[in-house]
Amino acid sequence: MSNEVFRQNLNEESPRPGGPFLIQLLFREPAAMPDRETMTTVMKRHIGPVECFGNNEKMAGFAALQHLAEFKDGKAPVQLLITQCSSFQGEGFDPFLKSQMWDCVEQRDQILKDCQYQVVATDMLAGALPALERADLDMDFLDALAELYPGCGAFYFQNCGKLIPAEAVRSHHIAGPDRFIRFGINVRFFNIEGTEDMLVDTVGMSTLFLPDLQYHFHGMDPNWVVNHAYNLASYVLLNDCPIQSGETVDGVVNGEMSRFAQWKCQYENALIQPPRAVLDVCMGEYAAGKRDAQ
């Protein structure tokens, strides 16, 4: 774990709930955009019916015909965009963001140094989809990108700050929306300087208009808390967040989720940037800090 000290900064810009889901494909060598026919074939295989509405040296665009965003004046298919290859400056990456790239701690600096090119992929209009549908679509899009760009060395998920080696994306065996929990949600860990307190939180849930989670605690193995956060995030996604302030969730006993430990939840402002509302999980005897009375 990094010993670097970071300061709380709740003045930075808050993430926009429901905003575009941004994926940066990182390369050691320039990557050519596949031809229109190849891209369409691969996109159909992973996403279903699509229509290519643009394919040139700057960008390719596809309409996901089965995924319709509904607005006051009608419906429109979600758009999936892929840019041409451009330069990438990984060595200038924010140290705070780098500190939470847990999926490639040993490879992180080498990836960011060696990968000097990127292809950016994003969805448009997808914020109007139900959370589960969008989670599946974005991950189907990710699987298509991994096939279309075999030279990709790593994927950076801008919404949550995860950097993941490409082989981990290509070799996963996760089904359904839990793919979004794996790749689109980052569970972060912080030691609170000058205390024995720790903080675990999530970043990325707001892309689906769902709340991030937060745990402020001491005296428990943080790996147990990280595992709980991933499991609770999956529950929130699968159930479209039925948890209300004052309700409880199963806690952790001897490293396993257990109904014999009930942890109270309430909505609060995040303790660590980016500024946002979070579902704070009060861990009973392990809880640290003060919480607003409800």
Image (spheres, rainbow, N blue to C red):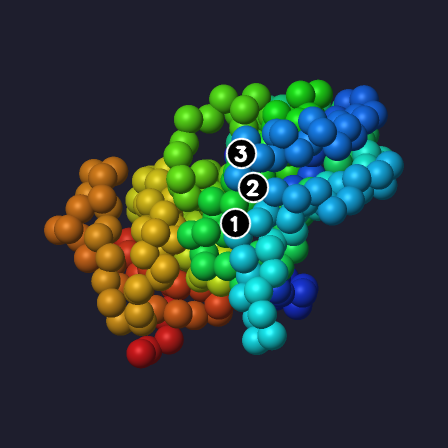
Residue indicated by mark 3: 46
The disc at residue 49 is 2
Left or right for 241, reference 100: left
* Amino acid marked by disc 3: His
* Amino acid marked by disc 2: Pro
- Vertical arrangement, residue 84 with respect to residue 206, above or below: above
- Please, what secondary structure does the residue beneath circle 2 have? loop
Nearer the observer, disc 1 or disc 3?
1
State the CA–CA distance, disc 2 to disc 3.
9 Å
The reply to whether the C-beta atoms of the residues labelled 2 and 1 are less than 8 Å apart is yes
Who is closer to the viewer here, 37 or 222?
37
Who is closer to the viewer here, 30 or 202?
30
Residue 18: % across, % down: 56, 61
- Please, what secondary structure does the residue beneath circle 1 have? strand
Nearer the observer, disc 2 or disc 3?
2
- Looking at the image, tell me whether mark 2 or mark 1 is earlier in sequence order: 2
Q: Which residue is at 49% across, 22% downward? A: 171
Q: Quadrant of residue 25?
A: top right
Residue indicated by mark 1: 66
* Amino acid marked by disc 1: Gln
- Looking at the image, tell me whether mark 1 or mark 3 is earlier in sequence order: 3
Q: Give the number of marks.
A: 3
Q: Quadrant of residue 266?
A: bottom left
Who is closer to the viewer here, 255 or 47?
47
- Vertical arrangement, residue 41 with respect to residue 294, above or below: above
- Please, what secondary structure does the residue beneath circle 3 have? helix
Residue 177 in sight: yes
Q: Which residue is at 30% across, 64% downward? A: 243
Crowdedness of circle 3 by 10 Å Cα count: few (<14), some, many (20+)? Answer: some
